[in-house]
Amino acid sequence: MLLSLCTYFLWLSISDLWTVQAKDPDTDVSTRSPHRDLAPNNVDFAFILYRHLVASAPGRNVFISPVSISMALAMLSLGSCGHTRVQLLQGLGFNLTNISEAEIHQGFKHLHHLFEKESDTMLEMVMGNALFLDHSLELLESFSADTKHYYELEALATDFKDGAGASRQINEYIKNKTQGKIVDLISKLDSSAMLILVNYIFFKGTWEQPFNPGSTREENFYVNETTVVRVPMMVQSGPVKYFQDPVLSCQLVQLEYTGNETVFFVLPEEGKMDTVITALSRDTIQRWSESLTMGQVNLSIPKVTISGAYNLRTILGAMGIADFLSKEADFSGIAREPQLTLSEVIHKAVLQLDEKGLEGADSPRVMLHTAPEPLTFRFNRPFIVMIFNHFTWSSLFLGKVVNPT
């Protein structure tokens, strides 16, 4: 796992390899990995978006699925035209002289297929997009066909004049799609809304090395100098990959889920959270991956459900995709309606952290008495969590946990 992750970031860090070369979109992609052509752009966009969200919400939790957002916005480009289309794809980090739009969409289609295949066997993951459009709009057949083909988009007619009814429709749809894992996404809608895109993802992995539920206990979590909350804390003692970074003044551990997901838990020293977040990049993750040591560790991590919900229009506007906020935006490729604008682009991501390991897996390994004195890593103050899929080379989740309650 460590070797594959290091290989991933080494590949992403070499410009000659992550500069995508244009290919014939009609070429058979079954013998190559089109999703990996997207990886460098997706990772860079992930960290840029994450930093913008953190800066916009000081002192608060932040949690997103960058690859899911990239997928949703690339899908949206199929309904945008002219400058809006170019701006959207360039905002995602794509150089359209080096990669064609057909390659972008084919890559995301393959990526989504791989996630679906893995979620059938290795983990619990539900992800998708839904477009709610006013019932007065007529969806263009080309947009409907393309988004269904590449992204499995579902479009639903909605009566936004009935705000309460529209909210119920959206909430029930997302609740059903996620088997009740995501509820009450919308509380209030503007009756003037015409078009709402919802991107959602729920994730619950299975640890390669499970925690013992009998060892979980209530402990203090120190939110800041004046606020302390009680959380259930999962505990594990044994060999763990770790690194104490003297450059960025933080500690980190790397854990593995069954399948292809690798998790970094990063604990900055007090007052160093912003410094660490500012430094997050492909190079930083590669350096951490290469510096990890396997050692005896007493590890404590909160047993929590982490989530984040955002209307991305304002954030994307601040990142340079200004047409999201402008009346000049051209989404005429979605429906026959002059001056059609997006009312909201909603993203909701949920991660459930618990003790669960693979059924039949060994209990956490017990340290021998002859082992060196173990290090202690207690994630009982604000920390960063990052989940990467090292097969698809994707940034699955990025989070800042200030208050786990």
Image (spheres, grey):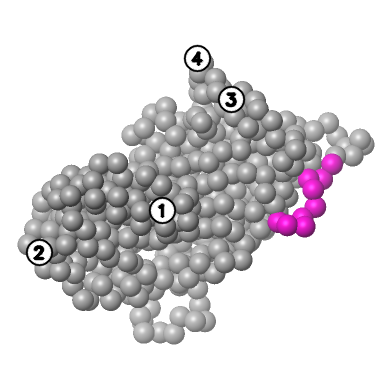
Secondary structure mostly seen in the magenta stretch: loop
Q: Can you tell which of label 4 and label 1 is closer to the viewer?
A: 1
Picture coordinates of residue 392, whole percent (x, y): 52, 64
Q: Is residue 280 left or right of residue 297?
A: left
Residue lying at 34% horizontally and 43% vertically, measured from the top left: 310
Q: Nearer the viewer, residue 140 or 47?
A: 140
Name the amino acid, label 1: Lys
Q: In this view, does 205 lie to the left or right of 101?
A: right
Residue at which label 2 appears:
337
Residue at which label 1 appears:
175
Disc 2 crowd rating (10 Å Cα; few below 14, some 14-19, many 20+) is some
Residue projecting furthest to the left: 338
Mark earlier in primary sequence (4, 1): 1
Per the model, the C-alpha gap separating discs 3 and 1 is 29 Å
| Residue 53 drawn in magenta | no
Residue at which label 3 appears:
230
Segment tinted magenta in the rendering: 358-366
Q: In this view, does 63 lie to the left or right of 356?
A: left
Disc 3 crowd rating (10 Å Cα; few below 14, some 14-19, many 20+) is some
Residue lying at 79% horizontally and 41% vertically, measured from the top left: 238
Q: Is mark 2 on a helix, strand or loop?
A: loop
Disc 4 crowd rating (10 Å Cα; few below 14, some 14-19, many 20+) is few
Mark earlier in primary sequence (1, 2): 1
